[in-house]
Image: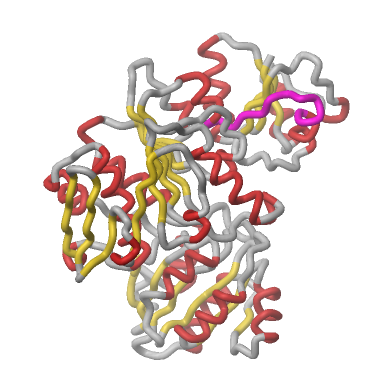
């Protein structure tokens, strides 16, 4: 019997799969009330007060179950294999074609770019992008394009993508992984089982990507043409040189021209080159692809202030990327749930690039203390709502107000999307009287 751990969206997809296959299973979730509700529905559940693992052969873990969870620890102590939903998917399906994308930032964008650029192959797009892969398992041979988080990669088992992408690796989720070394190790699992028939696409400008060792064919992208990468920027062009596939794409014709989006384009173009797609297919993607909301999205003008929603920036490196394209007349809102990441580099850059920093939320006091040590000016508010009102108060006509929090949303909100929508409400976007 297998133990299914976690009863969120991923857990539900696993339950459906096991029931469809007629496989026996028992359930666990750290939320005792939720677990009890499943018991009342007639499901077998793990007795957390008196854990017995004698009948458990394997555990399949949803991304929401941390590695320090007591049941995960018991599994480890009893040598019971633990797989993420991705590891379980690969064991069950063994797809011939699987493109797996990870990175601290940009992985959702690149996953959707690749899905779009390979549209004629009718790919299944799943994983951390929003749809659990076990919801999408097909009886036919399919191309899977999967966005993978470090949570999913930590127990990814025999995962062997035909093409892996590591876009960047910066400090993130340290409270979960306990150390940056553990976080990197989880990310590197994406190439662990690859061989010489496979490809890995890496960011040559990121030292944490350059240190990766793999048996697969390595393709690099870089903002610097002198580094000898397979995709690079030169004289206002993105140049892609990989085998017989060569593309030259003017940056001025791209809808998104920020540094991080240029890197995202290069990663996607290298996948196109592996598939030998003509330049016309690349241009189709460029013309129709649009970023999801809450990614440096200019959402309105309120009382002469330009309002920018970058709520998706849930770690310092994402906010640092955002700061590369802002004007000095910007009020920056920083705050949220403290994931244990270093913030000093972000604060130093924000002090140079913006008019004023406003801290809020669970990490607000920590940021204020750090800024004080660094002799930086700031405003401190308790909540995002207070910070939005303060930003309107201290800004001037023509200023920009940027929400790019550098931290996750779970101190006040259900998700970064929820945070972004509430920010818009607080600041008065869509309110004609504002």
Q: Quadrant of the N terminus?
A: top right
- Horizontally, residue 139 falls left or right of residue 177, namely left
- Percent across and percent down for residue 368 are 67, 80
- The x and y percentages for residue 194 are 46, 33
Q: Is residue 391 magenta?
A: no
Residue nearer the viewer, 204 or 379: 204
Write the residue at 72% across / 22% down. Answer: 39
The image quarter containing residue 31 is top right
Q: Examine the rendered structure and indicate whether residue 8 appears above or below residue 310.
A: above
Position above or below: 381 against 77: below
Taking the image as shown, residue 23 lies to the left or right of residue 73, namely left
Total numbered labels placed on residues in the image: 0
206 w.r.t. 332: above or below:
above
Q: Position of residue 16 (x, y in %)?
A: 53, 20
| Residue farthest toward the left in the current orientation of the protein | 280
- 67 left or right, relative to 250: right
Quadrant in the rendering for residue 198: top left
Q: Residue at x 45, y 49 (%)?
A: 166
**Residue plotted at (47% across, 56% down):** 168
Residue 157, placed above or below residue 240: above
- The magenta span reads 75-86
Spot the residue most to the top.
22
Residue 337: x, y in percent? 64, 62
- Identify which residue, 300 or 25, lies in the foreground: 25
Quarter containing the C terminus? bottom left
Q: How is the image coloured?
A: secondary structure
């Amino acid at each position: 019997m297998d133990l299914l751990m976690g009863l969120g969206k991923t857990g539900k997809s696993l339950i459906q799969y096991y029931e469809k296959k007629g496989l026996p299973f028992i359930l666990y979730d750290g939320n005792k009330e939720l677990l009890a509700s499943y018991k009342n529905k007639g499901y077998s559940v793990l007795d957390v007060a008196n854990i017995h693992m004698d009948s458990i052969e394997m555990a399949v873990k949803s991304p929401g179950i941390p590695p320090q969870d007591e049941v995960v620890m018991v599994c480890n102590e009893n040598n019971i294999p633990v797989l993420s939903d991705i590891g379980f998917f690969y064991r069950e399906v063994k797809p011939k074609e699987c493109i797996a994308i990870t990175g601290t930032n940009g992985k959702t964008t690149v996953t959707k770019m690749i899905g779009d650029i390979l549209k004629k192959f009718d790919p299944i797009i799943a994983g951390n992008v929003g749809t659990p892969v076990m919801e999408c398992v097909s009886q036919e041979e399919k191309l899977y394009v999967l966005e993978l988080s470090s949570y999913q990669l930590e127990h990814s088992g025999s995962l062997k993508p035909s093409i892996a992408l590591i876009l960047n690796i910066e400090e993130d989720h340290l409270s979960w992984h306990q150390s940056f070394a553990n976080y990197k190790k989880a990310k590197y699992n994406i190439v662990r089982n690859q061989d010489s028939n496979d490809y890995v696409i890496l960011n040559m400008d990121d030292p944490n990507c350059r240190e990766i060792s793999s048996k697969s064919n390595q393709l690099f992208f870089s903002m610097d043409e002198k580094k000898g990468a397979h995709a690079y920027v030169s004289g206002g062009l993105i140049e892609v040189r990989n085998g017989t596939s060569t593309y030259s794409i003017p940056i001025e014709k791209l809808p998104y021209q920020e540094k991080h989006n240029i890197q995202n384009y290069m990663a996607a173009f290298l996948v196109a080159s592996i598939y030998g797609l003509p330049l016309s297919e690349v241009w189709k993607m460029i013309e129709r692809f649009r970023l999801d909301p809450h990614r440096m999205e200019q959402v309105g003008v309120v009382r002469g202030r330009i309002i920018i929603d970058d709520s998706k920036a849930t770690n310092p490196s994402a906010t640092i990327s955002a700061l590369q394209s802002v004007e000095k007349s910007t009020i920056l809102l920083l705050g949220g749930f403290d994931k244990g990441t270093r913030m000093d580099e972000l604060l130093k850059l924000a002090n140079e690039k913006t008019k004023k920093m406003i801290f809020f939320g669970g990490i607000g006091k920590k940021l204020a203390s750090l800024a004080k040590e660094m002799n930086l000016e700031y405003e401190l508010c308790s909540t995002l709502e207070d910070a939005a009102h303060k930003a309107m108060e201290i800004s001037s006509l023509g200023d920009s107000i940027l929400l790019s929090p550098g931290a996750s949303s779970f101190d006040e909100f259900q998700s970064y999307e929820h945070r972004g929508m509430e920010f818009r409400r607080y600041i008065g976007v869509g309110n004609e009287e504002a």
